[in-house]
Amino acid sequence: MDIRKLKYFLSVVDEGSITSAAKKIPIAQPALTRQIRLLEEGLGTRLLDRNHKGVVLTRAGEFLYDNAMRLVADFDNVAKKTKAIADGDVDSLSIGITTIHPYIPGISGLISRFRAQYPEIQLSLESMLSGPQTTAILQGSIDAGILFIEPDDEPLLDTLPIGTFRMAVITSRSSGSLGKVPTSLRDFDGAPFIRFKRNSTPGSYDRIDRHFRDAGITPNIVQECHDDITIRGLVATGMGYAIMPSILAAGDDNLIAYELDDLPIYSPLMLAWRQGCKSAEIESLCRVAMGANT
């Protein structure tokens, strides 16, 4: 078993089939099939069951997948730190930040305070959605993230709360009137909604769906998008409604946020890192974040 075979295995599982993984890597499909077979032979067990839809993990495969993510991330982190030491850049921290960070002043403040208190740490930032951030942290391509996530949504992450934001139905003043000030999700039955794709923020997507079901309505989805900024822009044009943090309507006279009694969702903003991998640099960022919250 080696790192390359583990990376191939993870790619096959993530893509759902050997064919798709071979195209993404890229590698010839027969060669990828052989690498997976060699991995299974080396471990003495079948890891994947093949069917007409692609591949399905066996129980042994599920165990390997969970642990292989850690092993590959550890290997990549060691390689990255080794190169940093060789380049004379020992202290570094790469973090993802939520795509709506321009609307949350606390994030900019946290980054500014961290840079001021720890100027010796080279900080790199990447704006990312919560779903991709989670994947990037677990795979080791970033060290930590500032994202919207419930602690129970991803047990492989350790988290520190930074803030909490109320979700609301946001609309444009130019989109037309419902005839009354809405107080319930039922008031939006049949209204056009714009929403993010599930893989952008799975936990939030599912929670919103539950509230629609509890209200007894099926949302009229006219557009799905990958990020909140695009959705906000479409809402502003009057295309439809969206359920988003109400802070996205703050300071914009064209947008209205309706915080509804039957939509009691408070979305927690977290500083997150891979479970059990709290480096000295992440510890420093946590200290700055906790100082801001006291």
Image: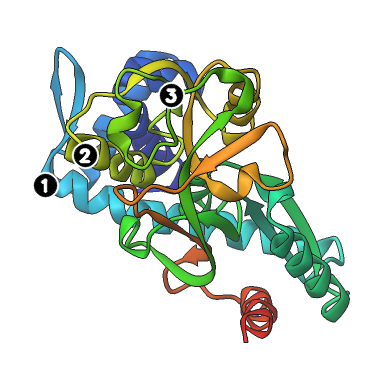
Mark whose residue sits in front, 3 or 2 = 3
Disc marking residue 59 = 1
Relative side of 183 to 293, left or right: left
Task: Kindly tell me whether residue 151 is visible in this rendering.
Answer: yes
Label 1: state its secondary structure: helix
**Which mark's residue is nearer the viewer, 3 or 1?**
3
Q: Where does the image place residue 180, in percent across and percent down from the top left? A: 42, 31
Q: Which residue does the numbered mark 2 point to in the structure image?
A: 40
Closer to the N terminus: mark 1 or mark 2? 2
**What's under tag 3, amino acid-wise?**
Leu
Which is nearer the N-term, disc 3 or disc 2? Answer: 2
Left or right of 233? Residue 61 is left
Q: Using residue 120 as the reference point, say whether residue 7 is left or right of it.
A: left
In the image, 115: left or right of 264?
Answer: right
Nearest the eye: 120 or 59? 120
Viewer-proximal residue among 110 and 232? 232
